[in-house]
């Protein structure tokens, strides 16, 4: 019994010499650290972030407006380029620089196989440049949209001349038979060839001297483009020199 009292006395003495540390002692330093940061610092940080966000929103809106402006400008340019392309294609068609296809006529003309009668003019048994020019004129007047002679595209500057027993078309020598292909209304062109006085004269010569002259309707023709060069000597765009 006396030994137990001694042990209790020693424990009591040690407890007073080494007092216990409260469990909340570790949080005192954290609270002190929080109290050291001014309260308005957080408010200023929030205000700064809001200002930066507002500035970024303004920048985004500005960039979106610029992008929209560029897109509209690009759309206008595309529309303008498309219009230019359509105009260019139309002018290329009128200039004979593209392949064209459509219904039309084939007109074949050839020299006579008959021997000239003694004392007769041998030239009457040949197809001449004026024969082809008469047929060309009749076809254009009938509304032909494109014409070729033996594959040579006829354009506004095309000339047809006799060179001996051959013809010169677009500076290219052509020999008979001469095949003219014309795109347009077959009925209108055939009717014009039937009613034209100059063509009636050719038909009369064909019967008399054996010249060959035939007309055929075709459902679809494909005419090649003009392959020559344009070399104006006096003309210039807009009068510029």
Image (cartoon, rainbow, N blue to C red):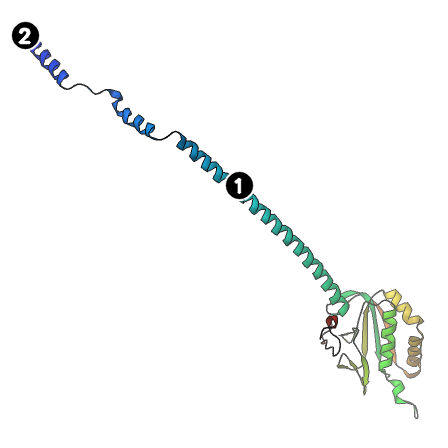
Name the secondary structure under disc 1.
Answer: helix
Circle 1 crowding by C-alpha within 10 Å: few under 14, some 14–19, many from 20: few
Foreground residue among 210 and 27: 27
Residue at image point 14% right, 16% down: 16
Q: How many marks?
A: 2
In the visual, does 64 lie left or right of 114? Answer: left
Q: Residue at x 51, y 39 (%)?
A: 54
Marks 1 and 2, how far apart at CA:
85 Å
Q: Position of residue 40 (x, y in %)?
A: 41, 30
Q: Give residue 89's quadrant in the image.
A: bottom right
Dot 2, crowdedness within 10 Å: few (<14), some or many (≥20)?
few
Question: From the viewer's perspective, is 151 left or right of 50?
Answer: right
- Front-most of 86 and 167? 86
Residue under the image location 92 percent in, 71 percent down? 194
Which of 71 and 198 lies nearest the eye of the viewer? 71
- Where residue 142 appears, as percent x and y from the top left, is 88, 68
Tag on residue 57?
A: 1
Q: Is residue 87 visible?
A: yes
Q: Is residue 114 visible?
A: no
Q: Position of residue 122 (x, y in %)?
A: 88, 89
Secondary structure beneath dot 2 equals: helix
Provide the residue designation for mark 2. 2
């Amino acid at each position: 019994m006396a030994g137990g009292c001694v042990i209790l006395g020693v424990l009591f003495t040690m407890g007073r010499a080494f007092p216990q540390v409260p469990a909340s002692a570790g949080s005192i330093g954290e609270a002190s650290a929080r109290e050291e940061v001014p309260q308005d610092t957080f408010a200023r940080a929030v205000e700064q972030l809001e200002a930066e966000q507002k500035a970024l929103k303004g920048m985004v809106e500005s960039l979106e407006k610029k992008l929209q402006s560029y897109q509209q400008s690009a759309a206008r340019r595309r529309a303008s380029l498309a219009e230019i392309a359509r105009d260019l294609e139309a002018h290329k068609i009128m200039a004979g620089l593209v392949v064209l296809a459509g219904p039309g006529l084939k007109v074949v003309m050839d020299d006579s196989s008959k021997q000239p009668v003694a004392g007769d003019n041998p030239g009457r048994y040949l197809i001449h440049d004026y024969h082809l020019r008469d047929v060309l004129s009749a076809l254009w007047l009938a509304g032909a949209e494109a014409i070729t002679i033996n594959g040579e595209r006829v354009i506004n500057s095309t000339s047809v001349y006799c060179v001996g027993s051959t013809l010169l078309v677009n500076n290219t020598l052509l020999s008979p038979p001469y095949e003219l292909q014309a795109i347009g209304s077959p009925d209108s062109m055939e009717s014009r060839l039937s009613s034209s006085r100059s063509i009636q004269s050719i038909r009369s010569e064909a019967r008399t001297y054996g010249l060959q002259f035939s007309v055929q309707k075709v459902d679809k023709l494909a005419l090649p483009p003009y392959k020559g060069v344009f070399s104006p000597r006096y003309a210039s765009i807009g009068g510029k020199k």
